[in-house]
């Protein structure tokens, strides 16, 4: 079985260098291809106007609308957002699992003789074809923006909060299936070769070999996605599900900054709670190496441990199922109509069983015959340069900022530093470190707690629509997301790996933590880049321009043939990035 | 044992499915006679959703009382959604602008009919407005505006992409009088989404120039009118109509038409609707009056994008 030669094992992982080179090329191309209009930042008049609007917003944020009536409304929107997100994620996990099994080469294709380029050829065997088909399905699910799913679903089952949740579920299914399958593929074959050698089939190899090895990361990503879903649910509200994001845009258009302030506070409250809950669950389900090492009693309590199974995972499971039950209940009976009457919003689900809902799909039939004349296709390809440019520059800015605050953000480098530097800091120094830690974490939390679309709404209101507003929105959000996962990568390093050489925490961070976490960082960055490309396409819809704008324009004019070509371009972009990342094998588990 | 019960269950299920579809089929046939409930929707040309719910709710209530079937207003968030709802039978009646009427006509063909339009709809105009900081007061035609705007780096906003008075007509008049697309003259051409948002954005200087329907400008506050004054009024054209699906049946359609034509000051709901829509009364109209727009759209006119 073990055919990989020692030479192959010792080969350097060139993937990241190729990726970095590609990113530099992409950066050059991004600056050259799209028309960057920095007038909003350089022109003194417009800069003053933007500053005035930011000032206005900050003042309003300091005095949010806290009237009883509006607070009640915001609370209701928060619950709506939460239930749609939980329901969407739960459905998505259920659908993504089998889809990912199909899309994972390790699971679906299993052991095979094909080597080299041949391995990437889908027609080599029926299994490989199934694998390729599953990957295509998940790419389409992911690439088609959730609001397009929402429009199609509205035609099928009508308007309502459920429609939003289902649209969200379809989109998240694509994302989760990709991540799961990539994580399973990332497990080194040698680590489960024994299971296979004992005669296990593909399913058994998956259940007893691959799945357990990747389960921690799968869990982490599921929880991370649940949080993202809570943020995205805010956006999907636009199709009638209500939700915080739709209301924020609504209030920004009317310049009601005090209400925007209140709504953003509620969004932050929701995402912070989700953040803490997810962290708590994660910690209960997997031990934190440094925490374990810190509490001596835990490690010495060997015998009592083996006596009974730990109860924590049960509590976590109970909590998760309780929230799921609540969200089903709320989705069905908790939403109030305009006239305050309760009505069952789950009823439209029954319409999927009728033929009528499916015949209504005929309305979108023309989407199946895209316009493909050369001149138009060229225009479509050109329009993709804008989201790519926004995503490239935004991701780079966000990543650089996340690395810059990583030292402050890491608990290991600030709070726990004395454990491995051997120093005994005074009260003042300790307080200073705690303050830095809190400041960095608060910055990251606010940046990621506010969805990128909401950031874009704000930056458009400040600087006017265009590439600059979109790029800043992506950069700020990326900073928030990456600062957290970068920080986790550093904090997850066992303290014993920081050798007490008497250097300061900053030097240790630069010489030990950063190089060790670098590979994880790059993996996360690439993931984020892909999600940023999709976000940039969606930002096009709200006035940033490019692919998303062109698509929405043609869709709204019922020029489905043209819209379809733009949709194909979106799918193509996603497929290309996905395949590139798989070829470079950026996602690796436990290596 | 298990096998048999499974196959029996399958059999029962298919019977149940057959029965349901039969019930549904007869249900839809009956619906063609007289549906149990009517859904009315509208293009969201007013950015204030609550105001739309309130006033179109009043129209729904009025129509419901007159034809003896409950009518409910369904609010949608964009123009395309209202056409989609009507075309797929999600909604039975829709308040559409001329462009959306033409779009629905192209998609639905004879399935679409017109119930009536407002007295003001056969001589509708759009306004071009400018932020006072631009120094533009009034222009004789849009060629002059294009000349003034050239090289200034101004930003322009239409309303919704599929709006007649907020996009198509202002654009085609601009094209006609200035001989050039607005994209060539202004730094950016944006779509604010609705008329009153256009007015607000020009008022606060997010965009320097914009175009919107005159009735929406009239509805704006006096303070906003000062910050977003009218610089040009377009020639007249035909606009909005209340449309319906033909499959509601001739009887019901006629009842609805009569109800609409007699909508007036005497009824509280009617008064509210007319005041909101800035109309004196509703008048008769025929779908053929919108054929010009259908031809225009099918001629492949440049609508940006």
Image (cartoon, rainbow, N blue to C red):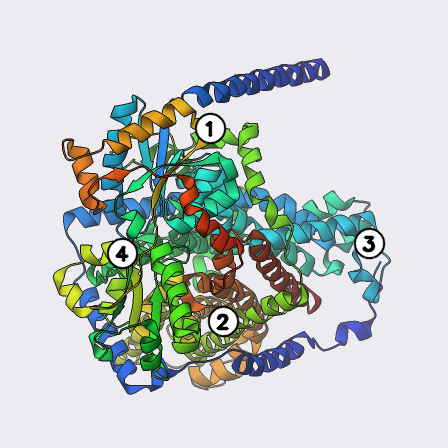
Cα separation, mark 4 vs mark 3, equals 52 Å
Question: Quick check: do tags 1 and 3 share a chain?
Answer: no
| Residue A261 screen position, x and y as percent | 24, 61
Specify whether residue B15 is in view.
yes
Mark drawn on residue A123: 3
Instruction: Say if mark 1 contacts mark 2, CB within 8 Å.
Output: no
Mark drawn on residue B247: 1
- Is A498 drawn above or below residue A539 in the view shown? below
Circle 1 or circle 4, nearest the eye: 1
Chain letter behind tag 1? B
Q: Residues within 10 Å of mark 1 (few under 14, many from 20)?
A: some
Circle 4 or circle 2, nearest the eye: 4
Q: Which residue is mark 2?
A: A490
Q: How many marks?
A: 4
Circle 3 or circle 2, nearest the eye: 3
- Is A329 drawn above or below residue A491 in the view shown? above
Circle 1 or circle 3, nearest the eye: 1
As helix, strand or loop, the secondary structure at mark 1 comes to helix
Q: Residues within 10 Å of mark 2 (few under 14, many from 20)?
A: many
Q: Earlier in the sequence, mark 4 or mark 3?
A: 3
Chain letter behind tag 2? A
Question: Quick check: do tags 3 and 2 share a chain?
Answer: yes
Question: Quick check: do tags 1 and 2 share a chain?
Answer: no
Specify whether residue A416 is in view.
no
Chain letter behind tag 3? A
Q: Nearer the viewer, residue A267 or A474?
A: A474
| Residue A508 screen position, x and y as percent | 48, 82
Cα separation, mark 1 vs mark 3, equals 49 Å
Cα separation, mark 1 vs mark 4, equals 44 Å
């Amino acid at each position: 079985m073990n055919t990989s030669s020692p030479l192959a094992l010792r080969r350097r992982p060139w993937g990241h260098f190729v990726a970095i080179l590609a990113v530099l090329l992409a950066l050059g191309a991004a600056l050259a291809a799209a028309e960057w209009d920095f007038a909003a930042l350089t022109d003194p008049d417009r800069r003053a106007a933007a500053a005035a609007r930011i000032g206005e917003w900050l003042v309003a944020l300091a005095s949010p609308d806290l009237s009883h009536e509006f607070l009640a409304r915001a609370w209701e929107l928060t619950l709506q957002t939460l239930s749609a997100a939980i329901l969407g994620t739960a459905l998505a996990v259920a659908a993504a699992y089998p889809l990912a099994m199909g899309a994972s080469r390790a699971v679906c294709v299993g052991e095979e003789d094909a080597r080299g380029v041949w391995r990437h050829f889908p027609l080599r065997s029926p299994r490989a074809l199934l694998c390729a088909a599953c990957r295509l399905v998940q790419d389409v699910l992911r690439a088609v923006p959730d609001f397009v799913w929402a429009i199609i679903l509205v035609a099928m089952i009508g308007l309502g909060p459920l429609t939003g949740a289902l649209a969200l579920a379809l989109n998240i299914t694509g994302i989760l299936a990709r991540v799961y399958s990539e994580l399973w593929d990332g497990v080194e074959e040698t680590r489960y070769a024994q299971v296979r050698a004992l005669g296990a089939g593909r399913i058994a190899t998956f259940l007893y070999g691959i799945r357990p090895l990747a389960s921690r990361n799968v869990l982490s990503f599921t929880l991370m996605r649940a949080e993202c879903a809570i943020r995205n649910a805010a956006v999907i509200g636009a199709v009638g599900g209500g939700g915080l994001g739709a209301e924020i845009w609504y209030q920004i258009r009317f310049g009601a900054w005090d209400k925007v302030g209140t709504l953003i506070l509620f969004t932050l409250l929701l995402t912070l709670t989700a953040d803490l809950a997810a962290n708590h669950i994660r910690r209960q389900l997997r031990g934190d190496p440094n925490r374990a090492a810190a509490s001596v009693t835990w490690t010495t309590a060997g015998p009592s441990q083996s006596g009974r199974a730990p109860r924590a995972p049960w509590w976590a499971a109970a909590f998760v199922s309780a929230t799921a039950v609540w969200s089903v209940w709320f989705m069905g009976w908790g939403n109030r109509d305009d006239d305050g009457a309760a009505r069952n919003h789950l009823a439209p689900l029954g319409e999927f069983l009728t033929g009528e809902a499916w015949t209504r799909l005929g309305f979108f039939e023309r989407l199946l015959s895209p316009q493909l004349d050369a001149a138009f296709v060229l225009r479509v390809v050109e329009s993709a340069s804008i989201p790519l440019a926004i995503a490239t520059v935004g991701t780079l800015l966000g990543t650089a900022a996340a690395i810059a605050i990583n030292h402050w953000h890491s608990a290991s480098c600030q709070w726990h530093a004395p454990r491995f530097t051997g120093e005994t800091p005074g009260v003042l120094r300790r307080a200073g470190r705690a303050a830095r830690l809190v400041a960095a974490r608060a910055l990251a939390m606010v940046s990621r707690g506010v969805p990128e679309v909401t950031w874009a709404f704000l930056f458009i209101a400040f600087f006017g629509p265009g590439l600059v507003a979109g790029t800043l929105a992506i950069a700020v959000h990326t900073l928030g997301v990456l600062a957290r996962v970068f920080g986790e990568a550093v904090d997850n390093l066992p303290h014993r790996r920081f050798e007490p050489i008497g250097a300061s925490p900053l030097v240790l961070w630069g010489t030990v933590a950063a190089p060790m976490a670098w590979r994880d960082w790059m993996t996360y960055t690439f993931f984020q880049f892909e999600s940023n490309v999709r976000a940039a396409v969606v930002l096009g819809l709200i006035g940033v321009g490019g692919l998303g704008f062109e698509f929405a324009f043609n869709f709204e004019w019922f020029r489905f043939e043209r819209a379809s070509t733009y949709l194909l371009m979106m799918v193509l972009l996603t497929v290309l990035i996905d395949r590139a990342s798989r070829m470079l094998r950026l996602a690796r588990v436990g290596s | 044992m298990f096998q048999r019960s499974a196959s029996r269950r399958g059999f029962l299920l298919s019977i149940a499915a057959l029965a349901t579809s039969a019930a549904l089929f007869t249900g839809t046939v009956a619906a063609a006679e007289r549906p149990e409930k009517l859904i009315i929707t509208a293009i969201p040309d007013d950015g204030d959703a609550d105001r739309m719910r309130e006033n179109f709710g009043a129209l729904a209530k009025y129509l419901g009382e007159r034809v003896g079937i409950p009518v409910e207003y369904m609010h949608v968030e964009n123009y395309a959604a209202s056409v989609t709802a009507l075309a797929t039978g999600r909604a039975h009646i829709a308040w559409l602008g001329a462009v959306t009427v033409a779009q629905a006509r192209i998609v639905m063909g004879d399935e679409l009919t017109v119930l009536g339009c407002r007295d003001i709809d056969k001589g509708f105009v759009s306004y071009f407005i400018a932020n006072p900081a631009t120094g533009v007061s009034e222009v004789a035609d849009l060629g002059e505006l294009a000349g003034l705007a050239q090289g200034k780096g101004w930003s322009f906003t239409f309303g919704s992409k599929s709006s007649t008075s907020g996009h198509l007509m202002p654009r085609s008049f601009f094209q006609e009088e200035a001989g050039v697309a607005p994209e060539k003259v202004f730094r950016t051409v944006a779509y604010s989404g609705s008329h009153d948002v256009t007015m607000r954005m020009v008022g606060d200087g997010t965009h320097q120039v914009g175009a919107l329907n005159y009735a929406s400008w009239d509805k704006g506050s006096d303070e906003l009118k000062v910050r977003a004054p009218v610089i040009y009024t377009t020639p007249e054209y035909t606009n909005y109509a209340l449309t319906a699906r033909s499959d509601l049946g001739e009887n019901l359609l006629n009842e609805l038409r009569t109800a609409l034509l007699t909508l007036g000051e005497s009824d509280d709901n009617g008064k509210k609707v007319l005041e909101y829509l800035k109309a004196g009364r509703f008048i008769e109209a025929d779908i053929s009056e919108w054929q010009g727009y259908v031809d225009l759209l099918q001629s492949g006119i440049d609508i940006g994008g």
